[in-house]
Amino acid sequence: MIWQLVKRDPAWRNALIAMAGAAVAALALPRQAIGLFGWLVCMPWLTSQPPQRATLFQAALPIRACDLLLARVLALVAAVWLPVTFAATVFLLAGRPAADAVILMEVGGGASVVVLAALSSRVREIAGSQWAPAIAWAIVCAAAWPVWRLMPPGAVLALCAVLCAGLFWNIWRQLPPAFEVLPARLTRQVSRQGNTAAPALVWWPILRSLFQPMTLFYLPMVVFMPIGGQWLAVSIFCFLPILASVTHMSWALSLPVRRSALLAAALLPWIALLLLGVLLSNWSAPKPPIRLEWSASNKISEVRTPLEFWGIGKAPIIESPWGESWQPATVRLGGVKIYNPYSFGPANSARFFEWQFRRASEAVYGEAIDYADFKRYRPAVRPLTRQARFAILNLAACASGVMLLANLVFAAMHWRFRRVFDHGQKALGVLLMAPIVCVLLIDLAPGNDGDVGTSLVNALLLRVSAVLPAGLPAVALAAVLPVALLSWTAAQLFRGVELPQPAAAARS
Amino acid sequence: MIHPADELPIYRQIMRQITEAIAVGRLKAGEKLPSHRDLSEQLVIAPLTVKKAYDELELLGFLETQRGRGTYVCARLPQPDPVQQMQQVRDTARKLLSQAYLAGLRYPDVLQVLEQAGHALAAPPKEEEKV
Amino acid sequence: MTPVLDFRAIERSFKRNVPVLNGVTFALEAGEVAGLLGRNGAGKTTLIRIAIGMLFPHAGSVRVFGASPTADPVGIKRRIGYVAEDQVLPAGSSVAELIALHRYLFPRWDGALERELLDRFALPPASRIKHLSKGQARQAALLCAVCHRPELLLLDEPAGGLDPAARREFLETSIQLLNREGTAILFSSHHMNDVERLGGRVILLDEGKVRLDEDLDRLREGVCVALVPRASADDPAALERVPGCLRVRPVSDDWHAVFRGEPDAVQASLVTALGVNGIRCARVPLEELFIEMVGGNRGEPV
């Protein structure tokens, strides 16, 4: 019977979809982006009412509370571990190092802790506090980085197991024979002569209806992940809390408030957070972009710059001024031929190597640096991709990405679109997932060292930066224009958007 | 009391209650009736319904409206409408017959009862005989 | 006089080829009260949402105060009060916060009316919406919708699920608004007693069209229902041929037919047409009329 309950749990159904996505993500994402994998693994849990132990319908049936709880915990834990084990298996089959597979398992362990912690509040009722999942998530995310650095892999898994067992026992011992549906604690008796003074901010009710507690989940991801460099994927995921706000906007739309104001209220906080994260990532200490690396595929040492500085097309022969030449190896990345213009061959002299290094540093930093100087002390220059000019373009690209998604989604929710396409909502889901899948698939291309998607955008932005005039104001203007245009079109589209109505109004 | 689900529309119920009150004497000639708004808020019905009832009664001659001062019961009440009275008598007769049949009486018994009632009414008032 | 609310040939569907509204046309003048009746799924909520601008008609036009609701949404919404059964107020806000928001958004806010209604409904101002009962939450919504003295009040099954006392208070408040401000009211309800009390016009929606659109009292007095034994007529067409017939439906051993006219006259014409006795004809209250006009068929032919 527990199996019957598990089968009907929405988390279980979503888990099977998440398995596929997790496998793709595990292969595609670099090590730094492991947070994103954790987030994907938690998606089935997030979308199935995390604090709820049983539905109202189940609580009315003659099933014991411990059975309901067991079924729910089993479904949620399976929803976490099925994708994780599937991804780990695919990982190992694809020949990745076993240490990375262990990292995936650790992510699964952390997710299990979050899942159980979210179920731990107010055990006597059918659903815990709405804030419990958000708090649990925040604590585990904050603790994840230091724990991962400080403890050996096996110990992390053991710690998670112990925590899970402890949390489960805590829930089990508090379990009543049957769940209550009302708060067990009495709410305060509020007197009629309560304060009628005007609250500080008149707009609180509208803000409360737009920002439900569940949107807190996206907060750590949107702020912290760009710092790790994953701002491209985050620009896309950032739209999900915006969409959640928009779907809850129905009450506010019946008030005499401008639609564009409501849209701005839903969009701006998340875009601001995203841009803050990108800014922080621009200023945080990056790894030196130029490395000397042994490239296993080419069997040669090379001056390795980030992908955005590579050349496109078949590798030409590079001639030094004094006559030495070298043809770099051509690498195919996702069907496109690229080459590293700063590599050097076994027959080349040290002088050639130093000349290549100066060329590379000129491309990356904007000024030529000798290798000897570079090795002795880190010059106090920032790479081009960390300078203010590039940062402005980067911010504009992120904001444009979010606004472009907004335009697509609002077009799918527009009443004219819905008149023609019955399944507009499903089209919406596909539209949202398509860019994410594309980004992941690009990163999945063979020969990849990670961050290919980001490098692509960086390369594009570098070319744009080269075309624009020198001063910062010109760059700022060029950056603001697409964002402003996309915002205007989004506002126009939003005027015709029809929101899906609350479920209770499925009738006329 | 107003019954929304009654056979009569609400405005007719008001009309009937006002005419009955006038007939019984609860409402005297020249007495002021509550305004549309007051009566509508009191009975929880639409003010236009009250207005319709008042207008109909005014057409029939029971009420008169004085601009700016309100609605009053007419000093001289109209003569009863013979057609309407006949209809009322027919209704009462039907009710009497159904009641009698339910009690097990037959038509000749009812005629006998009516004859007795007729005698009682025609006789001098000092003979107060119950039917 | 421009009508306050003007629907012209509104069409709207949610699935392809399944129209919910299929050519609905009517207009509401200032100070008029109209009750929108119809079965669940007949399109009443859709129509009211089109009026307030949350849904867009696929064909036809809607004019509120003479302008399209999407042309100047803020200006038009300032003059409308809207209460719906499923309109979810933000659960974490307190009543005082909601009132403060509405006071800010609507310039014509009437503080005296607000205090009076707060008192009458006995709403604790500092309590949050999620801690109020359903009736109290609906009353809070009504307060917010009414205290700015709107010119048009749109009520979408506002008394659904409320106890009779709460429903009566709802009515009282609406009638008070009607008296004081001459507000036009368009409301949809399943409680026929409330519809009879509020009076005015009755608009019956069925299968996407307007089946009836007349004054309530004229409807009550000008329409009657005839009960014809099944054996007297083989199929409804025999009854439908009689002039004045609005609808016929089978109910166990009888045909229930709705006719325009006096009961005696209709009975006479039916007797002439069918040549049988045993036909009963009477005026009916609104609830019975509603059921006869849009109810389903019951019972198989004997």
Image: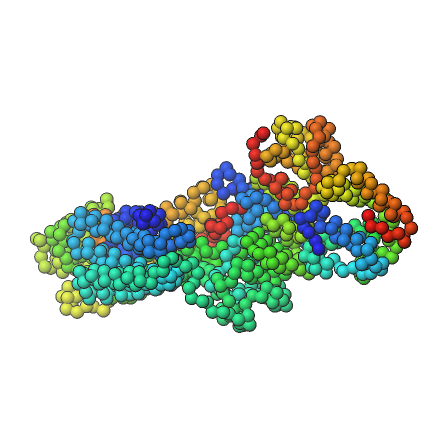
Question: Residue at left 82%, top 57%?
Answer: B25
User: Is residue A33 placed above or below A425 in the rendered structure?
Assistant: below
Q: Is residue B99 above or below residue A211?
A: above
For the residue pair A216 and A279, the one nearer the viewer reads as A216
Q: Residue at x 85, y 56 (%)?
A: B74
Would you say residue A387 is visible in this rendering?
Answer: no
| Residue A180 image-quadrant placement | bottom left
- Image quarter where the C terminus of chain C lies is top right
- On screen, residue A165 versus residue B114, left or right, reads left
Q: In this figure, what is the number of numbered marks?
A: 0
Tell me, what colour scheme is on the image? Answer: rainbow
Q: Residue at x 61, y 55 (%)?
A: C153
**Closer to us: A490 or A64:** A64
Query: Is residue A64 in view?
Result: yes
Give the percent coordinates (x, y) of residue A155.
18, 62
Q: What is the x, y in percent for residue A462?
A: 29, 56
Q: Nearer the viewer, residue A285 or C18?
A: C18
- Residue A304 locus on image (x, y percent): 18, 57
Residue displayed at 43% across by 63% down: A183
Position of C127 relative to B52 (above/below): below
Q: Is residue C288 left or right of residue A335?
A: right
Residue A48, percent across and down? 36, 53
Viewer-closest of C212 and A498:
C212
Q: Which residue is most to the right?
A: B124
